Image (tube, helix red, strand yellow):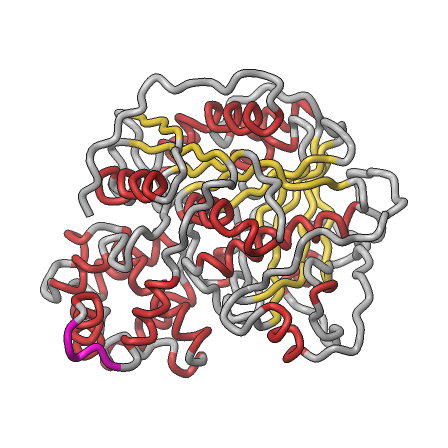
Amino acid sequence: MSPSTRRSAASLGVNVGLVALFVLGCAGAPSPGGDDVSDGDVDAAVGADAPGTDVADARDPDPRPYSATPAGCDDAPADLYVTPAGLPPLTPAQRGAIVRCVLGPELDAAQAQAAAEEAGASIVTTSGVRVVKVAYRTVRGDGSPAVTTATVWLPLVPRAQPVPVALVARSTSGIADACAPSRGELPLPELGLPFASHGLAAIAPDFAGLGNEGVHAYLDNREAAAQLFDGVRALRALVGGTIGDPVLALGYSQGGGVVLSAQALEHELTGARTLRAAVAIAPQWPTRPGSFGYERVLRDPDMITGVAGLAPPTVTVLRQYGWFANRRGIEHAADTFPLAQRGALVDQIERLCTIELGAALGTQQPRVRDFVDEGFRVAMLACLDGTAGCVEPAASFHAWMVANVVRADPAGARVLVVQGLGDQVMPAASEAACVVAKLRTEGVTPEVCSDTFGTHDSVLERKIEHAVAWAEAVAFGDVAAPTCASTFLPPCSP
C-alpha cells in the first residue's frame, strides 16, 4: 500500500494499520525512588485543576554515559499496558519515572531512512535509531496520578551531548485501547524517525488511558501538554543525564493542537522556556468552545451524520465521553448520549479506532439526535449562547471547554502552522485560519505554510520535510529556516 493510500485510511491523521506488538523484550529501566507522600499531597503540590507547575528540571547529575540501548529492559510487550501494582505515591520527583520498558528494533541509517520514506517522509539520515517503548508516570488534567505509554526514538549518533529532545504529538486515533499508536510494530515513523535520525532523542506519548487503564481525556490541552513535558523526564530516567532539554515540538492534527498548547503552557508547567520551535500540522486546537463543528452539530439535531463530515460527530462523542468518564466517573461516561443509543455508542467508542468509529456513527447513528441527548443539547446551546437553561451537567462541561482554550505565550517558541487548503476534516477557514488569528491576537506571529492541494490525509506527507527542516533550523540556528512557497490562508470564518 502506498503511503498516500495508507494515510487516506486514517482521517483525523491516524494510521490504524500498525497493530503488531514487539516480540523483543527489554530489561526494565529502574524508576527513581519515591518518598512517603500521599497522592493527595501531589494534588496540593500541582493544583487540583491543573496538571502541575513545578516540573522544571531539578535532576541530580547522572553519571551514566549515553547509550541508545538502555540497560535493564525485560518487560514483555503486552505488559507495557499493565501498570505494576504497588507503585510509590506520585510526588513531583516521580513525574516521568519509568514503570515499563520494551526494547524495540535498532535501525541503521539506511533502514531508518527507508522506514521514514515508506511512511511518506523523504529524509536524509545521519544516524541510525533505536526504538524503545516505555510507560511512565504523569498526571491527569485534574492533577491526579496517571501512567502513559509512549514511543521513544534514540539516535545511535547524537547530534550533541546533552542530547537535544524533540517532542512528538500524535494525531487522533480514538479512545479504544487497541488504538494506541505504540501498539504498532514501528509506530509513527514519519514523525519520530526524521528527528532521531538527525541526532535528537524523540518521544511521543500515547496519552494516559489510551492503551492502558482509564479513559483517554481527548482534547484536554493541559493534560496532554503536561504528559508531553513529563516525557522529557522519562527520557532522562531511561537514558540518564546525557539527555538535554526539549528544543522543538511537532504534532499533526490532534497533535498539532497539543504542540500549540505546549507552546502556550511550557513556562506554566515547567518553569522554563527551552522550546524554540513548535510546528503544528493541520492543528486541532480549540479557538472557541464551538470549534471542530461542535456548535453546528448542536444546532441541527436532524442533520445527517454523514453530511456533518467525519470530524464533528467523531470529535463530539470522543470528547464528551472522555471528559465525563474522567471528571464524573466511568458510570457517567455515556450521560450525554441518548438513552436508547448508549449501549451501542459505548461499544463503538471502546472498540473502534477513528475511521471505523466515524463509519459506525454514519450507519448506526445517522442523525445528530442519535448521538447527542436532547436535554444535554439544549442545555449546551444555552451555555454557548449565555442564556437561561445552562444547567448541569452541561454547565460544567462548557466551563471546562472555555478554560480549555489556552492563551499562546508571546515569549515562547516560534510557531509554524502547516495547513492543506483542501482539508476536509479541519477546514482551513474555520480552524487553521482562526488558529493563526488567535495566535496573532495573543502576541505570537506564526509562520504559515499552506498547500493548495493538501487534504487532512495528505498534508503531512506533502509537507513533513519542510516542517522538519524548519523546526531544526529554528531550534539550532545553524542554517536559515526555509520559507514556504505559499502562506495563503482564507479569512477566519468560525
185 lies left or right of 164: left
At a point 34% along the width and 38% down the height, the residue shown is: 440
- Camera-side residue of 104 and 389: 389
Residue 17 visible at all: no
Q: What percent of the width, then of the height, locates residue 185?
A: 60, 45
Residue 387, compared with residue 312, is above or below; it is below
Overall secondary structure of the magenta section: loop
Image label count: 0
What segment carries the magenta color?
387-391
Residue in the foreground of this view, choosing between 29 and 138: 138
Please tell me whether residue 225 is drawn above or below residue 84 in the rendered image: above
Q: Would residue 317 be visible to someone looking at this image?
A: yes
- Residue 226 in the magenta stretch? The answer is no
Q: Is residue 196 above or below residue 35?
A: above
Task: From the viewer's perspective, tell me whether residue 177 is left or right of residue 124.
Answer: left
x 13%, y 58%: residue = 304
- Locate the N terminus by quadrant: top left
Left or right: residue 245 versus residue 372 is right
Could you say which quadrant of the image residue 247 lies in? top right
x and y percentages locating residue 253 in the rendered image? 39, 44
Q: Position of residue 418 (x, y in %)?
A: 38, 32
Q: Is residue 116 left or right of residue 287?
A: right
Q: Nearer the viewer, residue 313 or 163?
A: 163
Q: Position of residue 216 (x, y in %)?
A: 48, 64
Q: Residue at x 23, y 59 (%)?
A: 294
Question: Residue at the location (56% across, 50% down)?
Answer: 267
Q: Residue furthest right?
A: 63
**Rendered image quadrant of residue 388:** bottom left
